[in-house]
Amino acid sequence: MLDAVVVGAGPNGLTAAVELARRGFSVAVFEARGTVGGGARTEELTLPGFRHDPCSAAHPLGINSPAFRALPLERYGLKWLHAELPMAHPFLDGTAAVLSRSVAETAASFGSRDAGAYRRLVAPFLSKWDTLTRDFMSLPLTALPRDPVTLARFGLAGLPPSTWLTRRFHDEPAKTLFAGLVAHVMAPLSGVATGAIGLVFALAAHARGWPVAEGGSQSISDALTAYLKDLGGLVHTDYEVKRLDDLPPARAYVFDTSPTALARIAGFGRYYENYKYGPGVFKIDYALDGPVPWTAEPARAAGTVQIGADSKEIGAALRVASREGRAPDRPFMITVQPGVVDPTRAPEGKHVFWAYAHVPSGWTGDLTDVMERQLERFAPGFRDRVLARATAGPAELAARNANYVGGDIGTGAVAGLQTLLRPRLTLFPYHTPHPAVFICSSATPPGPGVHGMSGHNAAKAVWRRLRQTG
């Protein structure tokens, strides 16, 4: 009998399996798709030689993850690549705010009236970032806070809506860039703890950057898989699990799935019926005949580029998609251009480009023209560079990855109490009604992103049970 079986070979499932195998437990992973990866895959979606990331592409939380940093992933081929600028936010007048490794450079891009306010906002936390991120990403009850004072101070700053936090800024560059940071998790700007979301992304960039993985996000999943196999773990692909009886006998079962799928497979009925999924996304992967022709010079050097004219436009786009049930006319967009630092992703002189916008859950329309018109506002001539495109709306994304219910790439709404307590209002989020069944997906704290911390935290709950029952 195995000690543990993990269902789903996304970053969280693989991390949970690695953490258990490192502690001497026998582990096997079962993945429905033909390759491992979940939200961290790389595929030729458009033309031969153009390697795209179907979901996550840039990884500020990955390089800062306490779980990943404790593993020898570089030994298994993972190499982080840093663009000259982690992120830029261009404006219609040809200027841009930037999120740089340097706090001073970032603050200067906001203008003189907001530079000091930004420095004062991040300074108390940046010097204690490693401790803070471990405390922040390990909650709840998986580890005692190492610095409860700093964590409490961070909570006071971050628990209110981001609109409260940005009141300290006078001008649009700072307000808009920060609104874009919050929008990475598709959270309305007025939601609880959205200030903390924006702060985490900003601090992560200052601490270690906002890199891509050389060769694509698949490198992260492949490194975790190779390490797991060296530890004696087994990985089975093309193995769809429809009920618990499909799995071999084990002392514990760990699911890197949506709560909906777990309830169906394990027979939990309506246990997760109150869990809410968020808006979907419409995503386009491009093969380009050259770099994106951004008007703003800083955007040409950035790995990630946020698109939104100002904070009001961003807020309206989020509100329309999440609350009004329609696609925005001027969507907020997150884009990634790996080619500024990784020439292996496309033939010489060509580029891959990654972009998505928020749409209502389950939306069935085509946002291609709307997104490209939005891009042309900041990069005139963009369409002339397009060689091929691969589009995916909510239905296509859900078909690629069953965790993306309704096209929600975060596997759950980041809204209300669910921002902090998910998938249920409990201090034991990785546990389920069955004492031997656990959940470790992005539906559990600390939530969305390729960082493995949900798997790391869940593994702690699993090995405590295994030791108690061993």
Image (tube, rainbow, N blue to C red):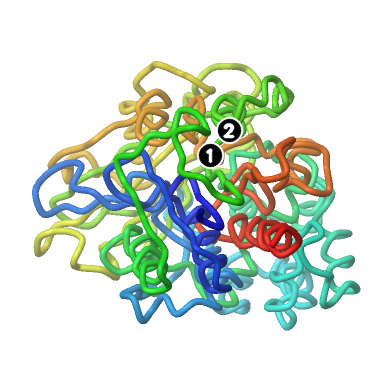
- Residue 262's label in the rendered image is 2
What residue is shown at x 23% (from left), y 44% (from top)? 286
Lateral position of residue 236 relative to residue 61, left or right: left
**Amino acid type at mark 1:** Thr
Mark with earlier residue (2, 1):
1
Q: Residues within 10 Å of mark 2 (few under 14, many from 20)?
A: many
**Where the C terminus falls, by quadrant?**
bottom right
> For numbered disc 1, what is the local secondary structure?
loop
What residue is shown at x 21% (from left), y 53% (from top)? 51
Q: Residues within 10 Å of mark 1 (few under 14, many from 20)?
A: many
> For numbered disc 2, what is the local secondary structure?
helix
Depth check: give the residue in front, 133 or 234.
234
Q: Give the image location of residue 162, x and y in percent.
A: 75, 48
Q: Give the image location of residue 111, x and y in percent.
A: 63, 66
Q: Give the image location of residue 404, x and y in percent.
A: 48, 34
Lateral position of residue 310 relative to residue 470, left or right: left
Which of the 4 image quadrants contains residue 137?
Answer: bottom right
Q: Give the image location of residue 30, x and y in percent.
A: 41, 46
Residue position for label 1: 257
- Residue 151's label in the rendered image is none
**Amino acid type at mark 2:** Leu
